[in-house]
Image: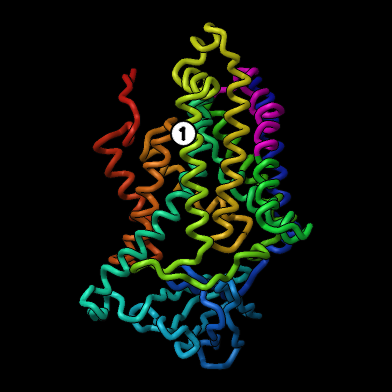
Amino acid sequence: MRRAVIAFTAFLSGLIFLLASPAHAGPADCQGLRGTLKLQGQPVNGAKIAVTTESGQPVKEVTSNAQGTWDVQVDKAGKYKVTLDVSSLPQNAQVRGGNNVRTPTVFEGNCSTVLFALEAKGAPGQQQEEAGGESSFWTTAAQLTFEGLNLGLIIALAALGLSLIYGTTGLTNFAHGELVTLGAILAYAFNVGFGLHIIPAAFIAVVVGGLLGYLQDRLFWGQLRRRGTGTIAMMIISIGVALFLRYVFLIFFGGQNEAFAQYTAQPGIQVGPITAAPKNFVAMGIELAVLIIVGLALMRTRTGKAARAVADNPALAASSGINVDRVIRIIWTTGGAIAALAGIMLGLSQSLKYTMGQDILLLIFAGVTLGGLGTAFGALVGSLVVGLFIQVSTLWVPPELKSVGALAVLIIVLLVRPQGILGRRERIG
């Protein structure tokens, strides 16, 4: 068994090395500057960005697209000056702090991301009061709270599958982020490639994601379990699987950002102090409904009770007549389908890219650990806390540091309650 694990790991490492080598890098090659402009979670279209050399020689002037993204490729590495034309921004938008100039450095063969934090005029830094006497600080806080709930529900969908898989198998699956990416890419393929509307495309992608989750356990993880592979070895293998899948996505999907054909740029609607696109409200309703349905299924159905029995004690569950392998495959199927749905929802709220699952993987782990490893409702509670803190913390910290604050909260909570918010105390040793 040890030789099989070593051989498999060596195979993955060699394949990843070949895919990552310059000869196969293909669409990942980049030398330039890029960024994304968003105002209260919505992309800013038509903003003008001028790029010059450090000495002032013009390089290129571009305009942000419907997803708020822009990109400028440069011939030489070095320091550049990026200026955002504030007159091209929406009338209610401004650059936080008033500084619309950045001076990033481009290194050989790399792309530098340029950040411009946009906020609504009259935001907290200006100490202005809105009509009716309500402080703009509280308006911004309400908007960020809504965005935090939206992000938290997406993280909860992804974290739910990861938590269920960990609870029944003990596997800490670092490839779960790629299952999220896979769902978004499948929906994009059916939507843009085959011309289906995003709703049937999303439904098919979720079904395919569940099927691939089943096959993943039937043909791969289940075989490793039967051979007695330890959880640490399987965790390391999952890292190799994640890298392998990530570069497969890069080859077939490319390194560029894409968007679904429908519901990409919707005008926002005002609900009290909150402004959001209609798709955000619909997506949050779907996410919440799926989380509640899965939670009730775990509590009320025979399969759910069997899954909880396997999570508590697999040997005792098997001795009582429960087909442990069948239960685990159902969990893998459900986890794959829910992860695919999370990827689709994430793709609707931002642009699609081959690293989108990797980008939120740390937040998924934070939500699972904070709520309590192996608990479905713990994943929901922990993810909502993480999503809320990430967005609301931007009232006081720069947006670039918002994820750091969420992980700091994770550390503090685990110091006080190591088992997580809804986790159980366990004897160690």
Using the image, determine if residue 2 lies above or below residue 155: above
Main SS, magenta region, reads helix
Q: Residue at x 59, y 74 (%)?
A: 66
Q: Is residue 41 left or right of residue 352?
A: left
Picture residue at 43% right of the left edge, 86% below the top: 91
Q: Hey, which quadrant is residue 256 in on the image?
A: bottom right
Q: Is residue 318 above or below residue 348?
A: above
Q: Quadrant of residue 345?
A: bottom right
The residue at the far left in this view is: 133
Image quarter (top left, top right, bottom left or bottom right) of the C terminus: top left
Residue at 20 percent across and 77 percent down: it is: 133
Q: Nearer the viewer, residue 103 or 419?
A: 419
Residue 213 highlighted magenta (yes or no): yes
SS class, disc 1? helix
Q: Quadrant of the N terminus?
A: top right
Q: Is residue 325 left or right of residue 395?
A: right
Looking at the rendered structure, the kind of residue marked 1 is Gly
Q: Residue furthest right?
A: 194
Taking the magenta stretch, the answer to whether it contains residue 228 is yes
Give the labeled residue for mark 1.
Answer: 295
Judging depth in this view, the residue of 282 and 321 nearest the camera is 282
* Residue 361: percent from left, percent from top: 50, 47
Figure disc tally: 1
Q: Position of residue 363 (x, y in %)?
A: 44, 48
Q: Position of residue 385 (x, y in %)?
A: 35, 48
391 and 191: which one is in front?
Answer: 191
Query: What residue range appears in magenta?
Result: 210-230
In the image, residue 375 sits, relative to residue 103, either above or below, namely above
Q: Residues within 10 Å of mark 1 (few under 14, many from 20)?
A: some
- Residue 65 left/right relative to 96: right
Colour scheme employed for the rendering of this structure: rainbow
How far across and how far down the image is residue 346, in percent?
55, 55
